Amino acid sequence: MPSRETMKGPAHHALETLHAAHPNLATSAARELLTIDVDWALRPPPALDTPVWQPEQPYLVVDGSLTTQANVLVRTGRHDNGALIVLGDLRCHNLMVSWGFDLVVTGSLLVEEVVITAPADSQFVVGGDLRARLLASGTPTWVTLAHPRHQQAQHTSGYVMAPDKPSRPSTQAPLTTLLLAEVLDREEWDAMDESERANEDINDILRVDTKAAHQYLAAGRSLLR
């Protein structure tokens, strides 16, 4: 990988300018990502009027805040790996990151409904506040925040890292009442017998079925009941 001293290009310059003026956990994470020796595209925030948005380039830096009423899927549909870096806030309806893709938001992440964290082998870092109705995190990848107080989701399933210690809610999100049954993974719960279930809360066991959730979001649909 090239050193930062040898990095060139508009995407690197835009990030270095922001990091010099307003350094935080996310700008540092973004600088690490930009050491990946690939073609990084720098684009202004897109003007969106579609129910779903996903990047066209596998390695994309958005130069400014990205605001949309769409479901945002961090993937391209044509590549196995990639990363989206937003140099500002990200506001959207729902958010999900695909396997092998990274997301770094240097500002705040403001989601109207649901945030589903990325699968394994992915990175998810937010520099400011994270607000959503539901954050499904830590199964198995988590959101990394600078401080626990930045976690402002109404409900959380799993945990967040802030920045290097896990922070768990006192009560797990009631997934059975929040989410559509079609996007819940009940396999572990259904495999338990009555005696095993007696000492368990179903919401501690259930997980989001990421494949089903992705299909719903890609169709422009909601995951909420």
Image (tube, helix red, strand yellow):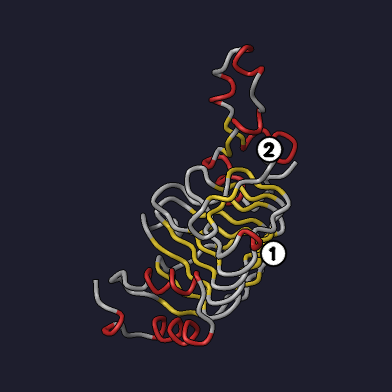
Distance from label 1 to label 2 (Cα)? 23 Å
In the image, farthest residue toward the front: 165
Q: Please tell me how crowded label 2 is: few (under 14), some (14-19), or many (20+) other residues with Cα within 10 Å.
A: many
- Asked if residue 44 lies left or right of residue 154, the reply is left
The mark found on residue 69 in the picture is: 1
Quarter the C terminus occupies: top right
Q: Amino acid at mark 1?
A: Gln
Give the residue at mark 2. 175
Quarter the N terminus occupies: bottom left
Mark 1 or mark 2, which has the lower sequence index?
Answer: 1
Q: Secondary structure at mark 2?
A: helix
* Quadrant of the rendered image containing residue 80: bottom left
Q: Is residue 37 above or below residue 159?
A: below
- Asked if residue 221 lies left or right of residue 60, the reply is right
Give the image location of residue 111, x and y in percent.
Answer: 67, 60
Q: Which residue lies at the image location 33% right of the left edge and 74% below the top edge?
A: 39
- Marks 1 and 2: which is nearer the front? 2
Q: How many marks?
A: 2
Q: Please tell me how crowded label 1 is: few (under 14), some (14-19), or many (20+) other residues with Cα within 10 Å.
A: some
135 or 219, nearer to the observer = 135
* Quadrant of the rendered image containing residue 12: bottom left
Give the image location of residue 95, x and y in percent.
Answer: 60, 56
The mark found on residue 84 in the picture is: none
Give the image location of residue 24, x and y in percent.
Answer: 51, 74
Q: Amino acid at mark 2?
A: Leu
Q: Which residue lies at the image location 69% right of the left edge and 55% below the top edge?
A: 153
Q: Which residue lies at the image location 55% right of the left edge and 58% below the top edge?
A: 162
Q: Is residue 13 above or below residue 142?
A: below
Q: Secondary structure at mark 1?
A: loop
- Asked if residue 94 lies left or right of residue 75, the reply is right
Give the image location of residue 4, x and y in percent.
Answer: 31, 80
